[in-house]
């Protein structure tokens, strides 16, 4: 029984790494990306739950713990007069591939893209714990979000709900500043 479970986990891991290699090759991402980038590998969770629809009325998913924390944080913000909403939550490996492929088709280089979007397998959105947050009166996914009252509220309060801003200015990952991108992290035990 234990050997069978171990075999299943190894097979799942092998499949995940094979899929990554294939997706990276299709996008022209170098084979040494994993060893060269500073981003951690972000496997998809075994279980996701439906959340509310995002700002564009698309269905979204998160892990149960992240959704519970998101709901509590959103409720607290609303009670204090701040309007925040989902722009994006879980994104699978194929979705990340397709997002990057569209940018390549529009003439961007892979180097330009990888400072804005992590390669498949390295996006926090794969974990089901990351959310892109928006607010009324501010265009989605723009640096101007940092000038909103909601951003100030998040900086002061998101940690109380175990959310942190993943990509502050000059972050260690080399990803462009994203004041709208927040990730749920279960507190250390």
Image: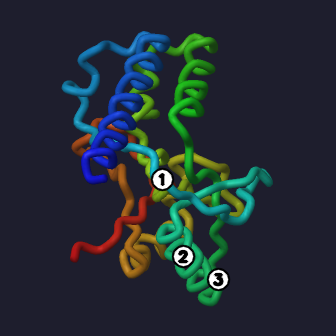
Q: Residue 171: x, y in percent?
A: 27, 46
Q: Residue 123: x, y in percent?
A: 42, 41
Q: Which residue is mark 2?
A: 68
- Describe the element under mark 1 as helix, strand or loop: loop
Q: Quadrant location of residue 8?
A: top left
Q: Residues within 10 Å of mark 2 (few under 14, many from 20)?
A: some
Answer with left or right where residue 62 lies relative to residue 19. right
Name the mark nearer the viewer: 2 or 3: 2
Mark earlier in primary sequence (2, 1): 1
Q: Residue 81: x, y in percent?
A: 65, 84
- Describe the element under mark 3 as helix, strand or loop: helix
The one nearer the camera, 172 or 26, is: 26
Q: State the residue lying farthest toward the right.
A: 57
Q: Are marks 2 and 1 in contact (CB under 8 Å)?
A: no
What residue lies at 55% left-to-right and 81% top-to-bottom? 72
The one nearer the camera, 53 or 81, is: 53
Q: State the residue lying farthest toward the bottom.
A: 79
Name the mark nearer the viewer: 1 or 3: 1
Answer with left or right where residue 79 lies relative to residue 35. right
C-alpha span from label 1 to label 3: 31 Å
Q: Residue 175: x, y in percent?
A: 35, 38
C-alpha span from label 2 to label 1: 17 Å
Q: Which residue is mark 1?
A: 46
Q: Which mark is residue 30?
A: none
What residue lies at 30% left-to-right and 37% top-to-bottom? 10
C-alpha span from label 2 to label 3: 15 Å
Q: Which mark is residue 78?
A: 3
Mark earlier in primary sequence (2, 3): 2
- Describe the element under mark 2 as helix, strand or loop: helix
């Amino acid at each position: 029984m234990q050997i069978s479970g171990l075999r299943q986990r190894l097979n799942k891991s092998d499949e995940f790494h094979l899929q990554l290699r294939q997706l990276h090759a299709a996008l022209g991402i170098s084979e040494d990306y994993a060893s060269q980038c500073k981003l951690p590998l972000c496997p998809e969770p075994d279980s996701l739950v439906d959340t509310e629809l995002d700002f564009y009325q698309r269905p979204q998913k998160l892990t149960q713990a992240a959704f519970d924390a998101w709901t509590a944080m959103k409720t607290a913000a609303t009670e204090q007069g701040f309007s925040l909403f989902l722009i994006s939550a879980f994104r699978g490996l194929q979705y990340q591939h397709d997002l990057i492929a569209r940018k390549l088709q529009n003439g961007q280089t892979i180097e330009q893209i990888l400072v804005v979007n992590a390669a498949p397998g390295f996006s926090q959105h794969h974990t089901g714990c990351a959310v892109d947050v928006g607010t009324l009166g501010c265009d989605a996914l723009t640096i101007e979000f940092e000038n909103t009252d909601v951003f100030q509220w998040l900086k002061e309060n998101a940690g109380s709900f175990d959310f942190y801003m993943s990509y502050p200015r000059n972050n260690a990952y080399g990803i462009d500043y994203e004041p709208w991108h927040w990730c749920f992290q279960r507190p250390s035990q």
